[in-house]
Amino acid sequence: MNFIKKSIQLVLFFYCYFTFSQHAAFYQFTEEDGLITNEFYDMIKDSKGYLWFASNDGLYKYDGDKFKLYDSTIKRGFAVFGLLEDENGRIWCNNMSGQIFYVENNSLKLFIDLNELIKTNAFLEFKIFKQKMYVSASNNLIEVDIKTRKTRYVENVSKDKETKTKGVKIVNNSLWYIEYTNTKNYLIKFSKKNKEIDSAQNVTDIFKTKNHLFVNTDYILRTDLLYWNFKNQGFQSLINPKKIRKTRTVYIYEDSKSFLWLCTNKGVLQFKIEEGKMIELNTFFPDKFVTRVIEDDNGNYWFSTLNNGVFIIPNLGITYYNKENSLIEENKVTSLANDGINTVFYNKGKKT
């Protein structure tokens, strides 16, 4: 599906001798595209190639031309979170009031209201696993039968009445989540047959990509990642770049080229793993809180942010230069020339 129907004017220079803070050329979506908010929490690509966005204004779908807002008259509040697609192609989301919704026949429908079970406004995380929905909230893990909608609490490990759960993920046909108290964090690997418990690492978050699994072992506002070795079934140390230690990591994404993307409150870091080390390749939008990144079916990269809306980079190899980040004296460039030895001239005839 061709998502880009707008004419995005890009300026490409072949080479620059100086190192400024150049950035890949991008387009920022605005109200003209159907958005009425700049605050986005989540973004997914569905099996048909459409993009869905969770925002403080509700659920949006991008159809290749405009953003469409999905709403419900029984939804409490506007903001939604936690996007996922089930095996039937339905898109799901939730809000902080305990309501969980799905999209069917082009409308947003209420699946269940867990407000009485969570008893407080809380950020919910949920996954659908073997015809059950598992919801991590401010108390025990909640299991919901998809067909009957019956609910039950999953017995916690710590036996502490103050136990809370978070970070529910599906990993290799098992359900992983975190139980935590004021003094201890437990990583739970849950299947129908048994529960494996790992309390050796102080796991504060779980990040699953297509081929990798990471956990954060530092405070929620800092980053110290470990790597899960699927072959040895254990954690492996990972050398993190110093620049991410004091950042808040909220998401890790793996693109079609197997590059990894670390979404943080200080931009998004593109990296790869070599010999137990994170190798930084690029940083994009370093002054923005990037919540998600996704590669669409045409190879365009989409970035949702917490305060600055949605951006798209059509080509990572195209760099935008202006007078603020290079030696260009004016932003109006009418022609380019190249001398064949990596020097570029623009309309005033001066070297860049």
Image (spheres, grey):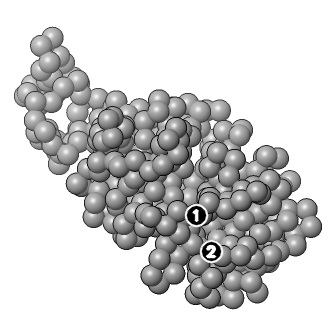
Going by the picture, which residue comes out furthest to the left?
350
Q: Residue at x 34, y 59 (%)?
A: 224
Residue for badge 1? 197
**Mark 2 falls on what kind of element?**
loop
Answer yes or no: do the residues labelled 2 and 1 have beta carbons within 8 Å? yes
Residue 157: assigned label: 2
Q: Residue at x 81, y 68 (%)?
A: 144
| In-front residue for pair 97/135 | 135
Instruction: Determine whether, in the image, residue 67 is placed left or right of residue 214.
Output: right
> Where on the picture, by quarter, is residue 210?
top right
* Kind of residue sitting beneath label 2: Val
Q: Is residue 284 above or below residue 30?
A: above
Q: Residue 90 in the image: x percent, y percent?
A: 78, 52
> Residues under labels 2 and 1: Cα distance?
8 Å
| In-front residue for pair 69/336 | 69
> Where on the picture, by quarter, is residue 134?
bottom right
Q: Residue at x 29, y 29 (%)?
A: 12
Q: Residue 178 in the image: x percent, y percent?
A: 56, 67
